[in-house]
Amino acid sequence: MEELEKKNITSIKEEEAEEEIDNSFVPVYHSFASKKYHSHLVSDDYLSILASKDGDFLLSPTGAQVKVSELEGKVVGLYFSANWYSPCTKFTNLLVNVYQQLKECNNINLGFEIVFVSSDENLNAFNTYRSSMPWFAIPFSDLEKRRALTQKFDVEGIPCMIILQPNDDKLDTAVIKDGVELVYRYGVQAFPFTKERLDELREKEKEKRDNQTLSNLLTHDARDVLLGNPSPKQVSVASLKGKTVGLYFSAQWCIPAKKFTPRLISVYKKIKQQLEGKEDEDFEIVFVSSDHNQVDFTTYFETMPWLAIPFDDPTINALAKYFDIRGIPSLVILGPDGKTVTKQGRSLINLYKENAYPFTKTRVGILEKQMNEIAKGLPKTENHSGHRHELTLVPEGHGGGAFICCDCDEQGYGWAYQCLECGYEVHPKCVNPVRRDPDN
């Protein structure tokens, strides 16, 4: 377990990787690059998997030794995590909540258990982290068992939760590798993590997306209006019908948002200017806040020229979950029909500014072709003043996917100058070329 590298590799197709998120808003799921698994069968009884020559016991939340046999007949989540990695600590808070809800359900009170498999650096860190967990743990001293589990389940990133579901004969164990994703997406509803249950949830999710409208996304029984500026202006959700709408997930405390929000305001105003006189087109943004209190929300929203969902409205958490928002700032674009156009709004704004409108695949395709033409005239390698190694120009699909520019700290995707030695990446526009002495 100690071999797991302490580095965060940005997912190629997700724009959440280097963003900030408040744990009270929505959990974060970050992991190292890993293989994609769904469910398969392993010819082992998980009771024997969790035992070793050093003992067949686990630690209870109080530190007492508990026999592995206590897990017999239960769905078990092996939770690979560490206190030194912030996405782990943030996801742990969510998992505790889900675990406690499951334990409070009488019909499944005895059917689910979690076992913490630590990759903490030392015993003190392990004990401190484990004190926040109401479930079992493999003793920190049992390094052999922790390593064996990591290898057996090909755990290449954390947080990771392997779901073990015993068959009736207790000889085969159904293994689901994406337990973190399932808990995040479905919460307690994912239990008992069977194929049938997951298929049912996915079908419901598909049905909801097929029937998605602005009204069912942005309203609820007690509210059908949004806040406008200046207060106390209100705008009906119905008035947004037929418009391209951006859902802006952000918060005053979010450091990346301090840079992105002014840029988004500028782009918003330019798009609105472009659309003046066009009766069949319009663009609007709705602020979806994860601020800590009403004062912060009000102060932040007053800087914005668009609309907002009221602070602490239940729709906020529903939208964050529905759109799988794991980091902020994030911009989801909805088309005039209310359907999702893209979740990559932030990247598109950073990359193309107001030219990104209306954010459709057709529009992005045109812009990508233009960028490819520009890239043909760029140097294949550059020496950048902000980095000691030579940088190589790479396209999307060859290491230049979604990334955070190490120079301007903003997100982008597509062409990038990348250090093939250490992964340092910058936007082509951010490169500051310098001459390098070949002897140094």
Image (tube, rainbow, N blue to C red):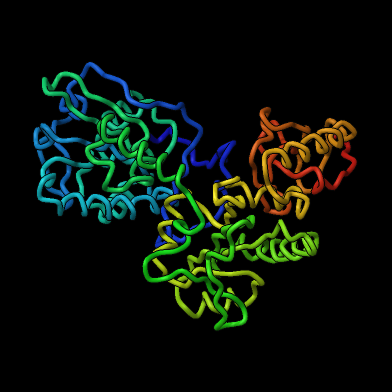
For the C terminus, give its image quadrant.
top right
Residue at left offset 58%, top offset 75%: 228
The single residue placed furthest to the top in the displayed view is: 43
Residue 247 in percent (x, y) is at: 56, 58
Q: Is residue 386 left or right of residue 297?
A: right
For the N terminus, give its image quadrant.
top left
Residue at left offset 55%, top offset 62%: 250
294 above or below 429? below
Residue at left offset 54%, top offset 60%: 249
- Which image quarter: residue 37? top left
**Residue 119 visible in the picture:** no
**Residue 225 visible in the picture:** yes
The residue closer to the viewer here, 276 or 256, is: 276
47 above or below 307? above
- Which image quarter: residue 379? top right
Residue at left offset 20%, top offset 47%: 135
Q: How many marks?
A: 0
321 above or below 239? above
Residue 193 in percent (x, y) is at: 26, 35
Q: Is residue 250 left or right of residue 258?
A: left
Q: Is residue 415 left or right of residue 239?
A: right
Q: Is residue 228 left or right of residue 134?
A: right
Residue 264 in percent (x, y) is at: 69, 61
Residue 406 in percent (x, y) is at: 69, 48
